[in-house]
Image: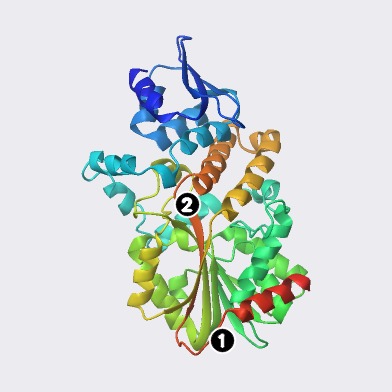
């Protein structure tokens, strides 16, 4: 407890944290902060505090999953938010420099190697997360099962409205016209593909590596009577052939891995028509490139990697894709995740019955940590537009605004 006590005396400045160790001794950190109620936790064994200090995400995540870290006041989101608020990315300054200096040589090598997503590993990694029970996703996603950052034109909007607005926002950037052929890389449960066809009549091919998602996406297309126009295939992006007028990828690039960035964009360029347009929607990382934290890779997204903007730019420049628009969504995923987290917490009993209490705590920790990552940490979202030919789009962004207004009003 000595190391933990020393570290948290320096870390927690704003807000109050109360910690009870396994012997019942109480430690207090920080000062009262308006709007931040006291957070109280209890450790059930001697080693957990030291594990948290030595490997914060893995140590805290496993301790919470296993019941060695028990929340006595406030929930796990309140704890993570308190810790990360006191270490917000914008305020780290010299502390970040110190962290880089003390990082052990070679410590991150395993993290980089785990992002080497060749085709068989990529499919296995996708199955780990996306082939969970469809009922689980029904419990916390919107009715269309949009499992990516929503677009909040107003923070008070419902999740359903924000996800619908996200689809309109993306569609507007694709500069859609009648008679187009669209490829969606990472189609999820088919919601965006069906939306694009509904709004434009376009033929859409959605590809996924998740067998569960494929079944549901195909069922939805059949039920809508558009299976001849909106098709879904279980195929890796590297194996797709043909030419497409538009390519869209939402929430999939985080699974590509930095060793495959150029390969991904080279495939996209090959598949994109000469006058085609591509829209990439991805989580991004502020600051320096670094591997995904150990807990997330182990339990949630094996092979996952969050890119910096410079990494994406290097890869697209190398394959001669022209960047025509860049938008940074700063708060939108934080708002989205708050909705998902509260819906998950409301469905606690059903999720525990479906799996077990440890799984529920794992899922809650994942959503709570991700939420604070977008409000206090390095996480943001990018929407990036590409063309092969600089004449493929109008020379101002007015067409996006006009199209989005039409799509949201229809």
Of the pair 79 and 179, the residue shown nearer to us:
79
Please tell me which residue is depicted at 41% across the width and 43% down the height of the picture: 91
The answer to whether one can see residue 132 in this image is: no
Q: Which residue is mark 1?
A: 394
Of the pair 119 and 112, the residue shown nearer to us:
112
The image position of residue 33, as x and y in percent, is 56, 29
For this view, does 373 lie left or right of residue 92?
Answer: right
Please tell me which residue is depicted at 69% across the width and 33% down the height of the picture: 349
For this view, does 203 lie left or right of residue 71?
Answer: right
Position of the C terminus, as image quadrant, is bottom right
Q: Which residue is mark 2?
A: 379
User: Which element type, helix, strand or loop, lies under badge 2?
Assistant: strand
The image position of residue 180, as x and y in percent, is 62, 85
Relative height, residue 193 to residue 99 (above, below): below
The image position of residue 104, as x and y in percent, is 23, 40
**Circle 1: is it few (<14), some (14-19), or many (20+) Cα within 10 Å?**
few
Relative height, residue 68 to residue 264 (above, below): above
Could you tell me how many numbered marks the image carries?
2
Q: Nearer the viewer, mark 2 or mark 1?
A: 1
Position of the N terminus, as image quadrant, is top left
Give the image quarter of residue 36. top right
The answer to whether one can see residue 108 in this image is: yes
What's the distance in space between the residues labelled 2 and 1, CA to CA? 31 Å
User: Which element type, helix, strand or loop, lies under badge 1?
Assistant: loop
Please tell me which residue is depicted at 43% across the width and 40% down the height of the picture: 295
For this view, does 247 lie left or right of residue 319?
Answer: right
Between discs 2 and 1, the one toward the N terminus = 2
């Amino acid at each position: 407890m000595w190391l933990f006590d020393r570290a948290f005396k320096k870390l927690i400045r704003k807000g109050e944290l109360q910690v009870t160790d396994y012997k019942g001794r109480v430690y207090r950190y920080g000062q009262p902060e308006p709007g931040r109620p006291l957070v109280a936790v209890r450790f059930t064994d001697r080693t957990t505090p030291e594990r948290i200090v030595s490997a914060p995400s893995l140590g805290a995540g496993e301790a919470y999953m296993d019941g060695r870290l028990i929340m006595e006041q406030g929930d796990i989101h309140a704890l993570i938010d308190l810790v990360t608020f006191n270490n917000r990315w914008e305020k780290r300054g010299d502390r970040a420099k110190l962290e880089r200096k003390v990082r052990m040589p070679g410590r991150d090598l395993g993290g980089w190697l785990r992002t080497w997503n060749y085709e068989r590993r990529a499919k296995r990694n996708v199955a780990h997360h996306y082939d969970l029970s469809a009922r689980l996703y029904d419990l916390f996603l919107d009715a269309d099962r949009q499992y990516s950052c929503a677009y909040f034109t107003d923070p008070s909007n419902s999740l359903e409205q924000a996800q619908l607005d996200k689809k309109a926002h993306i569609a507007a950037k694709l500069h859609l016209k009648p008679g187009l052929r669209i490829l969606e890389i990472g189609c999820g449960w088919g919601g965006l593909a069906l939306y694009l066809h509904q709004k434009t009549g376009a033929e859409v091919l959605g590809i996924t590596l998740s067998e569960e998602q494929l079944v549901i996406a195909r069922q939805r297309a059949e039920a809508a009577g558009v299976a001849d126009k909106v098709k879904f295939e279980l195929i890796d992006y590297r194996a797709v052939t043909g030419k497409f007028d538009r390519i869209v990828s939402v929430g999939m690039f985080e699974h590509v891995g930095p060793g495959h960035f150029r390969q991904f964009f080279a495939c996209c360029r090959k598949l994109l028509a000469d006058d085609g347009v591509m829209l990439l929607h991805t989580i991004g990382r502020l600051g320096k490139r670094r591997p995904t934290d150990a807990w997330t890779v182990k339990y949630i997204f094996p092979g996952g990697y969050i890119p910096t903007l410079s990494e994406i730019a290097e890869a697209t420049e190398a394959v001669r894709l022209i960047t025509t628009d860049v938008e940074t969504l700063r708060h939108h995923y934080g708002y989205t995740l708050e909705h998902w987290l509260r819906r998950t917490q409301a469905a606690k009993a059903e999720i525990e019955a479906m799996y077990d209490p440890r799984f529920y705590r794992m899922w809650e920790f994942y959503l709570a940590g991700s939420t604070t990552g977008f409000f206090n940490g390095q996480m943001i979202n990018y929407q990036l537009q590409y063309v092969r030919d600089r004449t493929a789009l109008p020379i101002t962004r007015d067409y996006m605004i006009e199209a989005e207004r039409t799509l949201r009003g229809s």
